[in-house]
Amino acid sequence: YTPIPRPKGYRVSWHANPAVEPHHFGQSHPMKPFRLTLTKQLVMAYGMHHAMDLYMTRAATYEEMADFHNTDYLDFLKTIIPSDMQSSDQSDSLARFNFGDDCPVFDGLYNYASLYAGGTIDAARKLCNNQSDIAINWSGGLHHAKKAEASGFCYVNDIVLGILQLLRHHPRVMYIDIDVHHGDGVEQAFWSTDRVLTVSFHKYDKDNFFPGTGALDSNGPAHPLNPGAHHALNVPLNDGIEDDDYIALFKEIIGSCVSTYQPGAIVLQCGADSLGCDRLGCFSLNVQAHGACVAYTKTFGIPLLVVGGGGYTPRNVSRAWAHETSILVDAANIIDPNIPDAVTFRNHFGPDYSLFPPLSDMRRIENKNSRAYLASLVRTIKEKLRYIQG
Ligand code: TV7
Ligand code: CA
Ligand code: ZN
C-alpha cells in the first residue's frame, strides 16, 4: 500500500485496544467484537493508520465509570462470572441488572466493558486538550446501557462518559445517533439538562422493535422546571429507508440543529446496523449513504468524537467504518474501492471484494417511508427547535 498522508489543517486520533477484539458474547449472539478486527485490517491495508495519531487505550477505572454508573451495578459487573448465570443465589441480581440472553455474562466481561469505555473517555479528553480535532473509537457507541442496568448488548455507557468529559470544557454538546436502534441510554442520561442535545434516527415500532422508545413526540420530561425539556429529538423511521431520502433527512435535521444549538463539540454514534443487509436492521442504506452522514457532520468543523455502535454483518460493518475513517482523514477519494489484495481475512469480502457492494439491492425491503411522511418529520422537528436556544 501507499501510506495515506495526514489531512491538512486538522488532526485525527484513533483510539483502540486490541484486547477488546477477542471477547465472545456466546454462540449465536449477534454482537461480534471480531468486526473491530476486520475494520482495523481494512484501515491498515489502505495505509490509513499513517494519517492519524494512534493511541492504545487503557481500561476506564472504576471511579471513571462511577461518573455515571451506580457502584452497586459496577460491583456486580466486576465480580460476576459466567458460571453465575446458572446459579440461583445470583438470579435476583442478574434480573435486577437486566442480564440474560441480550446481555450475557461472558469471560472477561468487565475487562471488555472497561476497555471500550476507556477508549471513548481518552478520545474525549484528547478533544478537550486540543490534541485532536476528530477522535475515533470504533469499539464504543454502546448507547443502551443505563445507570444501573445493562441493556441491548451494552454494559457501560461509554458515550455518556465521553460526553461528561466534553461538558467539562464545552457549554453545549450535541449527540447524533445513526444506529438503527433508538439511543435511549444517552437520551435518558441527559434529559434533565439543556447542555446536551440528543438526536437519534432509528426504526420505531413501539411493540415490535427494540427498545420501543424514541417516538417523534418523546422529547424528555416536559416539566416547566426541567431545563432539559425539548433537548431530546427523535426521528422515528419505518422499514426500508433508502440512500437519498436518508441523506436529505439527515442534512435537513442536523443542519438545523447545529445552527440553532451551536454546540462546542459533537459526538456521532455510527451504528452500522442501519446498513442494508444487516442481520438485525431493516433499512436499505449503502455504505456511501451511511458515510455521507459522517462527511456532512465533519463539514461543521466542530470538535468531533466518532464512536461505533451496532452492526451485525461484520463484513459490512468493517466496510462502513473503514470508509468513514477514510472520510475523516480526507482520503475517501484516493483509496481504491477494490479491497486490497494484502488485507488479512480478505475472504470475508468476497465474491465482490468491493468496499461498496450494492447492499440496497441484495435484500430488497419495501420502503415504508413515504416522501410525505419524511417531509412531516422535518416540519415537526423544525417546530420543536423553536424551543431551543444556542
Ligand atoms: C447497540 N434484537 C444494540 C441492539 C440491541 C438489540 C435484540 C436480539 C438477539 C439476541 C440474541 C440472539 C438475537 C437474532 C435481536 C426483546 C427481546 C428479544 C433475546 C434472544 N439473537 C445496538 C436488542 C434486541 C441473544 N432485544 O443498538 C443471544 O436476534 O428485542 C430484544 C428483546 C428479549 C430477549 N431476546 C430477544 O445495536 C449496540 N436481541 C441470539 C443469541
Ligand atoms: Ca439511532
Ligand atoms: Zn443498533
Image: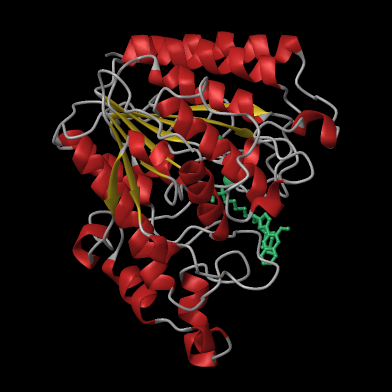
* Displayed-image quarter of ligand 1: bottom right
Observer able to see residue 177: no
Observer able to see residue 390: yes
- In the image, 203: left or right of 291? right
Residue 341: x, y in percent? 63, 44
* Above or below, 355 relative to 25: above
Q: Quadrant of residue 304?
A: top left
Residue 282: x, y in percent? 74, 38
* Above or below, 296 relative to 345: above
Residue 196: x, y in percent? 31, 30
Q: Quadrant of residue 303?
A: top left
* Above or below, 310 relative to 244: below
Q: Give whichever of 267, 253 is nearer the camera.
A: 267
User: Measuring 44% from the left and 52% from the top, which residue is drawn there?
Assistant: 139
Q: Give whichever of 340, 27 is nearer the camera.
A: 340
Total numbered circles: 0
